[in-house]
Structures are given as C-alpha cells and as structure tokens.
Image: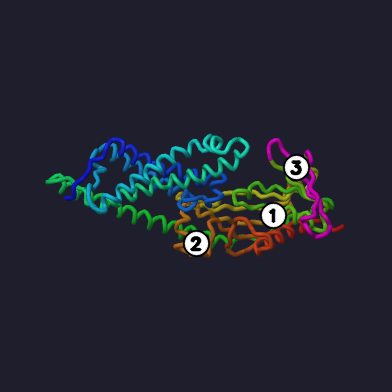
C-alpha cells in the first residue's frame, strides 16, 4: 500500500466547500448577464433534473467525508501526491471564488466604484464564476491522485474496504446506466409524440370577420417571452391596411403606439407612448400545456387569436406546438444530432419542426411567422 497522509480537519472542510460550490456556481452561471455571456453554462446543458442528479452524489460524498476521517487519505509520494497537491490548490481558489459569488455586488462596487458599478459587478461576477469552477475541477484532480495512488487501509480492514468500494462502484454504475437508458427512452418517445402531434395540428381557422373596418391592432405577446420571441410589431405596423399597432406591458401599464411609415421600411416607423390602447381588435397568444413527461420535457400549444375587445369573441385563430427538451436536452444531440433545437415548434408558420426561439431578421423563420400573422389579420378584415 502507498504511504498515506491522513487529512486534517481544514482539508476536509475545504474539500466539502469546494465540492458544494458547484451548485451555486451552476445557478450563478445561468442568471442575468452572466447567463447571457455563458449561454446558461452547465445548467443550460443538464437542466433542473440534471442539477438534482448532480446534487445527490455531492451531498452523499460530503456526508462520507464528514463521517469518516480516512475518507480523504491521500498518497505521500509519487506523481499521485503531486496531483493531490495541485487539486488542493485548485480547491482553495474555487472555494474562495465560490464564497465570493454571494458577494459579487459589494466586491464589484469596492473594486470599480459606483461610477462603473454595472460593468464592475458584471466583470467581478464573470471572474468569480470562472474561479468557482476550479473548485470541483480541483476535487476531480485530487480524487484522481487518490485513486491512482491506491490509498487503502492496511490489513483485513483494507481488504474489506476494497470489497465495499468495488460493490459501491458497480452498484452506482448500474444505477447510472439504468437511469440514463430510462431517460433516453423517455426523451425519444416524447420527441416522437411531438412530431406525431405536428402532423395532426389544424390549420388557421376564421370564425367571423370583424364587425367594422379597422386600421389598428393591439398586440399581446407576453406568452412568447419565455421563447425569446415576439410578434413582429414593427413589421405588422407596415401592413398597408393598418395605420398603427399598439403594445402594452408592465405594471403600471405602459402602451406604445407604432405608426405605419408608409415607406415599407419599419426602421422609419414613428413610436409614441400612450396611456392606454384604443384598438378594438387584439392579436394575442394563449399558451396551454398539452403534454408533460414528468422527467423534464414538456409540450405546449400556443393559440394565436384575433379577438374583439368589445365583446371578447374570437374572430380567427391559428395553432402552434412547442416542444421543450428541458432537463433532457442532454439527449437531444444523441437522438437527432444538430438537426434540432432546445425548444422546437411546428404549426401555423412552419408545419415542420424547427427552432422555436428567436428569429434572426431576414431569416426564413422570421419571414414565415410575419407572413402567417399578417394573413391572420387580413383574414378578418371586412370588405370596404
């Protein structure tokens, strides 16, 4: 057996803090401006369910380290000893940076001052986030050194320890394989169910034409915000039959009036703030959950409606399905490669599954959605 060094209490505390730092680091890396910079970080990849799966073994390992003083015994010689030393250094930096995540605001103000508060907090947060990831990486390096150094107790206790460790490893591996296979099957079947629903989705429906000629529309697209998408208000305002469109949001409510420039260039549209909307007819989106796997995936149905605000009647509607891979997004590329997006949609704009998130200006998706929304508005206009 390799000669070992029994861990001090401070090393055990450092190990636990560095390992636990992974959880706040994942949450911090998916929030606010940091999340926009990192693309959601590791949390965006594994999802909420993945975070739970990661948290359980972390807590179990911390319990083992607290309970047994020999759980972190590490080699005293050889390259494995050097790996453990490097791991301890990384854990130290990661633990300090992880603790600093909770004080990113005050630290940013202290380092950059109030004049540069926003950029200061952002830059400080980025460096703390990157540094905090050294914590769990240091744990991996430290454990690699321990395992390669074959740190086990002497005598019969060592034999029993190895047997228990082997059983635990094989058991954990079996559970991991079974759980992964189960989640893979769920992800595959849910995506297939979504594709089948796309084929059966009805087309746009016109129930009645407007009772009077109208030249403006109120847009309510709050339900699309989780998809980082919106109804194309600027383009809609330039429909020949309209003079302006309105959009209201916030609390207290603020409304914006976008006036048709009559040039065909929405960049020249005039925008004005108003106290309330005056349009009689509203183009809105109503969401509903139609399918949920219970393991992270979810299918929504979005109904695009044109309603008369005076009597609440729906004049026309169009439907779209949105499939959210959620926490099972990790299986998306295994099943479909790069041909799918984390959130997919099909329906009134494009019948085949496609990315449901933000549309680039001038893209096929942007043109398809605007044309579909334009057609729905014109379908309820009475003849002059």
**Quadrant assignment, res 202:** bottom right
Which residue is at a point 59% across and 43% down the rendered structure image?
A: 119
Mark toward the start of the polypeptide (1 vs 3): 3
For this orientation, the residue located farthest to the left is 155
Tell me the CA gap for discs 2 and 1.
26 Å
Kindly identify which residue carries mark 2. 192
Q: Is residue 195 visible?
A: yes
**Secondary structure found at label 2:** helix
Q: Mark 2 or mark 1: which comes first in sequence?
A: 2
Residue in the picture at 43% in, 47% down: 133
Q: Which type of secondary structure does the marked residue at label 1 adopt?
A: strand
Who is closer to the viewer here, 112 or 158? 112
Callout in the foreground (1, 3): 3
What's the CA distance linking mark 1 and mark 3?
24 Å
**Picture disc at residue 18:** none
Residue wearing tag 1: 317
Q: Mark 1: few, some, or many residues within 10 Å (few <14, many ≥20)?
A: many
Q: Classify 10 Å Cα crowding around label 3: few (below 14), some (14-19), many (20 and above).
A: some
Magenta segment: 250-275
Image quarter hosting the C terminus: bottom right
- Residue 255: numbered disc: 3
Total numbered labels: 3
Is residue 19 visible in this depiction of the protein?
no
């Amino acid at each position: 057996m390799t000669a070992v060094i029994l861990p001090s209490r401070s090393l055990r505390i450092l190990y636990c803090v560095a390992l636990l730092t992974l959880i706040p680091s994942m949450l911090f890396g998916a929030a606010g401006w940091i999340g926009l910079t990192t693309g959601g970080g590791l949390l965006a990849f594994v999802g909420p369910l993945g975070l739970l799966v990661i948290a359980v073994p972390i807590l179990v390992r911390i319990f083992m380290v607290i309970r047994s003083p020999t759980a972190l015994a590490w080699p005293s010689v050889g390259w494995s000893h050097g790996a453990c030393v490097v791991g301890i250094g990384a854990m130290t930096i990661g633990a300090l940076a992880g603790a600093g995540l909770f004080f990113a605001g005050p630290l940013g103000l202290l380092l950059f001052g109030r004049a540069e508060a926003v950029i200061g907090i952002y830059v400080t947060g980025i460096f703390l986030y990157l540094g905090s990831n050294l914590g769990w990486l240091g744990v991996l390096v430290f454990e690699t050194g321990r395992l390669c150094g074959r740190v086990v107790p002497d005598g019969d206790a060592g034999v029993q320890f190895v047997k228990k460790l082997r059983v635990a490893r094989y058991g954990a591996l079996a559970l991991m394989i079974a759980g992964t296979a189960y989640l893979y099957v769920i992800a595959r079947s849910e995506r297939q169910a979504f594709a089948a629903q796309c084929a059966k989705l009805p087309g746009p429906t016109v129930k009645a034409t407007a009772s009077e000629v109208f030249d403006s529309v109120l847009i309510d697209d709050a339900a699309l915000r989780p998809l980082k998408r919106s109804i194309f208000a600027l383009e809609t305002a330039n429909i020949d039959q309209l003079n302006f469109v309105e959009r209201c949001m916030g609390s207290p409510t603020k409304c914006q009036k976008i006036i048709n420039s009559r040039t065909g260039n929405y960049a020249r549209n005039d925008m004005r703030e108003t106290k309330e909307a005056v349009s009689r007819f509203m183009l809105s989106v109503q969401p509903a959950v139609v399918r949920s796997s219970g393991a992270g995936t979810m299918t929504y149905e979005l109904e695009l409606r044109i309603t008369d605000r005076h009597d609440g009647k729906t004049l026309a509607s169009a439907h779209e399905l949105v499939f959210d891979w959620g926490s099972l997004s990790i299986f998306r590329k295994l099943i479909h490669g790069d041909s799918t997006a984390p959130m997919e949609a099909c329906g009134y704009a494009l019948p085949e599954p496609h990315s449901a998130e933000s549309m680039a200006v001038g893209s096929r998706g942007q043109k398809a959605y605007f044309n579909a929304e334009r057609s729905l508005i014109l379908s309820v206009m009475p003849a002059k």
